[in-house]
Image (spheres, rainbow, N blue to C red):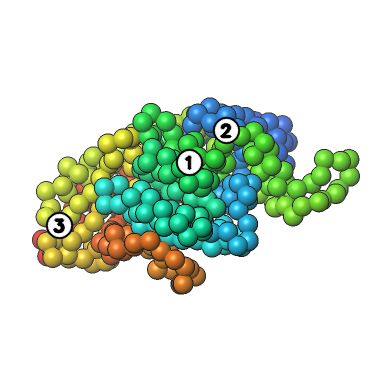
Amino acid sequence: MSKPRIYLSPPHLSEHEAPLVADVFASNWVAPAGPALDAFEREFAAKVGAKHATALVSGTAALHLALQVAGVGPGDEVACSTLTFVASANPIRYLGATPVFIDSEESTWNLDPGLLADFLKRRRAAGRLPKALVLVHLYGQSADLDAVCKLCDEYGVLLVEDAAESLGASYRGRSPGTFGRCGIYSFNGNKIITTSGGGMLVSEDAHLVQEARYLATQARDRVNYYQHSQIGYNYRLSNVLAAIGRGQLRVLEDRVEARRRNFARYQELLGDLPGLRFMPEAPYGRSSRWLTCVQIDPARFGADRETVRLALEAENIEARVVWKPLHLQPIFAGCERVGGEIAERLFDHGLCLPSGSALRDEDLARVAETVRRCARG
């Protein structure tokens, strides 16, 4: 009999979701909008410390609307972290704008503020500043927001935070996603909390969030018949899924602590192996450790990260390669990049280990033993 599958980051429900969904069913309020949706938006905004929030069908939809309501349009350029999932940059293209990709720094794996400073200085001299910056908080760790916010303020660049992977993290006591003009989060099935699929847009600007909500509901004019003066989208989260989100939000801190325990346990089990290094935690905040990520130096470890990944798969254990940098993606061929070598090295050597919040100690031990066998080989 094959061993049970260990997944990378599966959903983890609690005792709270089913009663909340049952309440929605009992009220027959299963239409897209409703009381659970309103409550989820209020509760989420309070949790992250934002003034306003609107719930949407995905983090990608949230980022699309965030950029649109921030004024990004055809012909604009938008700077973007390069080490991230493709959804961080696709909405730039949706709007007819062009991404410019900025490399990572070794110490956090997030966007390098030094490279951003050099880029903005050169662009101001040339009279070609980007309209906005999409700053990604990677794998549960906040980017260096003090440095980035200072640069965006100095150069007049709109800051849009992609906090899809970092709900539950902190930056100097505050939630990443709440520093820029607006921020977005994801509730995809692999995230720390899930609505099966969904996202959230937050901002201090009430008008911005109202405009995003208007566009997300097909941009219907505020008259008593169906009239549309702008192109809109069908992007609102359903009342049913919002009920799931409300239940998940109640256990967010438990889920973060569980993932941080996973990381600590992996360090105990694997930290002595030469050539294996864990993603560092920045001193300015707390990582949620959404995923436990490692770098594997084949010369010192004795095997490359693909050998390790395949060995894990042979044991029915799911692991994933670190994001392929966006400046290497075929769909963004020809786009400008600033640096790129660090992101490429992280991609070449990086592996994400199973990190679900319901993992048992025996699961972690099984993963670690497989990795250790590769090192011995």
Q: Which of marks 2 and 1 is nearer the N terminus?
A: 1
Amino acid, disc 3: Gly
Q: What element carries label 1?
A: helix
* Residue drawn at 54 percent across, 40 percent down: 181
Q: What element carries label 2?
A: loop
Residue 168 higher or lower than 352, as above or below: above
* Residue drawn at 51 percent across, 58 percent down: 128
Nearer mark to the viewer, of 2 and 1: 1
Figure quadrant of residue 173: top left
User: Observer-nearest residue: 342 or 323?
Assistant: 342
Amino acid, disc 1: Asp
Q: Is residue 350 rendered to the left or right of residue 371?
A: right
Q: Compute the Cα span from label 2 to label 3.
A: 44 Å
Residue at the spot of label 2:
204
Nearer mark to the viewer, of 2 and 3: 2
Mark number, residue 275: 3
Q: Is residue 287 rendered to the left or right of residue 43?
A: left
User: Observer-nearest residue: 145 or 38?
Assistant: 145
Mark number, residue 258: none
Residue 249 in picture, x, y percent from top left? 50, 33
Residue at the spot of label 1:
153
Q: Which of marks 2 and 3 is nearer the N terminus?
A: 2
